[in-house]
Structures are given as structure tokens and as C-alpha cells.
Amino acid sequence: MRRRWAVVLAVCAVLLLAGCGKPPGTDGDLINGWPAFPKAVTPVPAVGACYPTEYNETWYTDFTNAVPCSTGHQTETVYVGTFTGADADRSSPPLGGSPARRTAYQQCQQASVDYLGGDWHGARVELGLVLPDDKAWTGGARWYRCDVTRFQDANYESVESGGGSAKDGLRGAKPLAVNCLMLTDDGKGKIKKTDDVTCDKPHNAEFIGLFTAPDAAWQADDKARTKIEDGGCEGVLSTFLGYGGAKPYSNYVGWWSWGFLEDQWKLGDRTERCWAVALTGSGLSVNGVRVVGSMRGLRSGAPKRP
């Protein structure tokens, strides 16, 4: 009986297969002629894209939240680069302070000049390096992104979140350029408040240029850093006042800088803004001092008062 059932089942199987005819134009082979699935590609950011999110050195999402730069946004991509070689072979993104990050940030600075029309340090913008998060890196992302954030003021206190691109902000009329300030001190020479003003209005500080410190290890000592800052900005002021690099002397004009930041220094950014500051003539306080117009070329002369 077992053999009989086996024969019957075999016959039924043949009959069933015979009923499954091939459609015209097919060969019945289910595995040949099918194209392979394309290799997965991780998304890459685009230059000129704007995002409503605040700057973050690590990017956790895709790029579908990009918005037109004519609408409200907080960050704008000025350059996109790619890690290659040993940097790309890493199992995770390059660490902070690493040579790979320094090299990427150097490229950010160079590329931002083309995008803005000048050195970003002289604009009301801040430049940051953005890397993909660990998950995106594991998935094959090897891009890095250079973003700028626009500010309403030179002291980076109020983000400009309205519409408008930073592109060409240092060309033509230079709408993003820093110019003059109204400073308020604590009576002992320490600045406690800054307000941006145009140089044709009463002010007591004027942007005069940039100083880049020599490449060296970060100085943890405040006095050592101040010595570097003052020495650099003194040279900028000398040229500004017309001393041609010689030590400047004036009872009416001094210099001021905000100071280096450790994170920026470790990225290779050792550039500092320098300001000419109108003094009382008898002390270091700027309170109550007002000038109009530029202080350029004054040498030891007094600035024009309102």
C-alpha cells in the first residue's frame, strides 16, 4: 500500500507541473537576466543649502529639512568636502583636535572666502565644521560640511534668523561686514557691553583688521594669550594709524581684541579681530568717549568729536 500511494503521489505531481505553462516570451529561468540592486549611497549635503536648525558640529539627520535661503534659517552651507585615504578608512569620524579636522577646517576657511567674498572673521558670521554622526559614518558617509551662521551683531549675541543668504556678504556694499562699535566698560578698562553702529554715527571703536598668531600649542595661561593678542593688534593699529609698523603712540587711540578661543585654536584658527578704541586722553576708560568718522591715519592726533 505504501508503494501504491507513492506512485499515485508522483503521478499527481507530474500532472500538476504539467498544468503550469510558461507565458510566451519567457524561458522559465527565474534567476537570470535580473539586474542587481544598485549599491546603497548615503546622502551628501549641497553647497548653498539653508537649514532652520542651529549649528551643530555633528549632523544627525538627512537633508530634507533644507529651506529656501530667502526664508528664515539659521545655518547655510558654504562648502562640502570629502575625507579620503586613511581619514576615510577610520571606523568613526575624526576626533576633535585631530589633524584630519584641522585640514578640513582649513579648507572650510579657504572656501568661505570664495563664498562670502572675503575673510569670514571680518563679517557678522561664524564658520563651523559639521561632520556626519557615527551611524551615518558607519553607513558610508565620508563628507564634511562648512556652515556659516549670520548674526545681527559683531559680538555673536543675536542670531540673524530672517531670510537672506550670506553669499557675497563681503562683496560690493558688504552688508555683512563689521564696522564700528559703541563700547561700554566697567570703569577699570574691561569691556562689558558692545553695540554695533555705523561709522558715520557716534562710536568709540572701529574695526581695523585681522591678526593671525603663529602656529603653536594652545596657551592655557591668560596672560600669555593676552601678550600674543596685544602684540598682534598693536602691529595692526600701527599700520592703521599711519606708523608703518613702528610702535604706535597716541593718547587718544588704543586697541582691543576679544581674545582667542581654545576650540578654534585647536582647529587651526588663530585669527583675531583688532579694533581701534577711542580713549579719554587721560585714562583707559571708553565710557563717555564719542567720535565720528574713521580714526585711520590719525597717528597721535585726536579723533573728530560729534
Image (cartoon, rainbow, N blue to C red):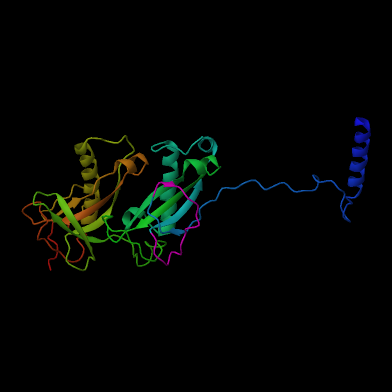
Identify which residue is drawn at 56% across, 48% down. Answer: 42
Bounds of the magenta segment: 56-73
Q: Residue furthest left?
A: 282
Identify which residue is drawn at 16% across, 52% down. Answer: 192
* Quarter of the image that includes the C terminus: bottom left
Q: Position of residue 188 (x, y in %)?
A: 9, 49
Task: Give the side of residue 43 with respect to residue 30, left or right.
Answer: left
Q: Residue furthest front?
A: 1
Q: Quick one: 41 or 28, which is closer to the camera?
A: 28
How many numbered circles are shown? 0
Vertical order, 20 against 152 (above or below)? above
* Quarter of the image that includes the N terminus: top right
Q: Residue 215, can we see it?
A: yes
Q: Quadrant of residue 174?
A: bottom left
Q: Is residue 60 magenta?
A: yes
Q: Residue furthest top?
A: 2
Main SS, magenta residues = loop
Q: Position of residue 243 (x, y in %)?
A: 21, 52
Identify which residue is drawn at 20% across, 57% down. Answer: 194
Q: Position of residue 146 (x, y in %)?
A: 43, 51
Q: Is residue 181 magenta?
A: no
Q: Position of residue 57 (x, y in %)?
A: 40, 46
Q: Quadrant of residue 98?
A: top left
Q: Quick one: 171 or 143, which is closer to the camera?
A: 143
Task: Give the side of residue 240 with respect to residue 147, left or right.
Answer: left
Q: Residue 297, can we see it?
A: no
